[in-house]
Amino acid sequence: MEIKTKSNSLSIKAGKMCAVLFLVIMIVFTLYPIIYTVFGSLKTNAELTSGGSFLPREWQFKNYYQAFVQADFVKYTINSVILAVSATVLAVVTCALAGFIFARRNFIGKKLFLALYTSMMFISLGSVTLYPIYQLLRTMGLSKSMVGLVIALTGGQAVNVLLVMGFVRGIPKELDEAATIDGCTIYGVFARIILPLMKPILAVVALFVFRNTWNDYITTLIMTISNPKLQTLTVAVVQLKYSVNAAAEWHIMLAGASIAIIPILIVYLLCNKQFIEGLTAGAVKG
């Protein structure tokens, strides 16, 4: 019995050590690019391209000044904030409404429409859809406006709609019936009963949409070709790859990348609790 107990204890300890080692490796691989970007943004271009020490020999904080002032990153940062916030608000509203209707109401063609909508999750058309979207926005006169860019980046919310739908299905229908008996219309049921209970899953949707919109490059690049003033921070960073002297401005690019990382980290730190609660609540109720 003692031998079996010792064997079980050793296996448990070995399992914990493997789990800790795996987590440490994952943390290193996750944080290394961020740390390298931050330290690289504080080096000179020559030091960065020569592959010297990991830490800067001299801390070049002026790289951030050059990025903000000379590269006009203030304007691009404002564009990114406006775009990300607008797309997030629009996506949260549409996903909340669509998820509620799919979960609580029956209508003709619901199953077919839901099946087609769900199937799009498994079909990746990628850049193939960019030209039709651009032509559609151009026909509507929105190809050179921030509104058109917001609409282009808000579409394709199938995953988020299904998350909200699964969450709403976990809310007892008796609440809807009680509110209806008290005189609430469908709009009142949604606004007064369902919407307050959807806050955790809507926080998850908001974080996903904000992250994807802030980091988007291809769609934003294509949609802002006709109006460069609408370029976002992500696009502007890549545009710095070559300066007027035909030399790669890697140190300024990394400074811009560091600037682009900061808002995502701030949003995640502020919404971390709601994000975890939304995922766990969706897993239990969905």
Image (cartoon, rainbow, N blue to C red):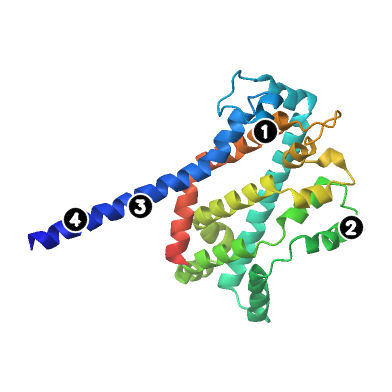
- When the figure is inspected, residue 63 is found, relative to residue 259, above or below; the finding is above
Badge 4 density bin: few <14, some 14–19, many ≥20, Cα 10 Å:
few
Amino acid at dot 4: Ser
Q: Horizontal placement of 192 versus 44: left or right? A: left
Percent position of residue 187, x then y: 62, 63
Q: CA distance from mark 3 to mark 4?
A: 15 Å
Amino acid at dot 2: Met
Helix, strand or loop for disc 2: loop
- When the figure is inspected, residue 132 is found, relative to residue 208, above or below; the finding is below
Q: Residue at x 46, y 48 (%)?
A: 26
Q: CA distance from mark 2 to mark 1?
A: 37 Å
Helix, strand or loop for disc 3: helix
Q: Residue at x 67, y 45 (%)?
A: 214
Amino acid at dot 3: Ala
- For marks 1 and 4, the one nearer the N-term is 4
Residue 154 quadrant: bottom right
Callout 1–callout 4 Cβ contact below 8 Å: no
Label disc, if present, on residue 19 of the rendered structure = 3
Q: Residue at x 64, y 77 (%)?
A: 115
Give the labeled residue for mark 2. 140
Percent position of residue 158, x then y: 64, 65
Give the labeled residue for mark 1. 254
- For marks 2 and 4, the one nearer the N-term is 4
Helix, strand or loop for disc 1: helix
- When the figure is inspected, residue 60 is found, relative to residue 10, above or below; the finding is above
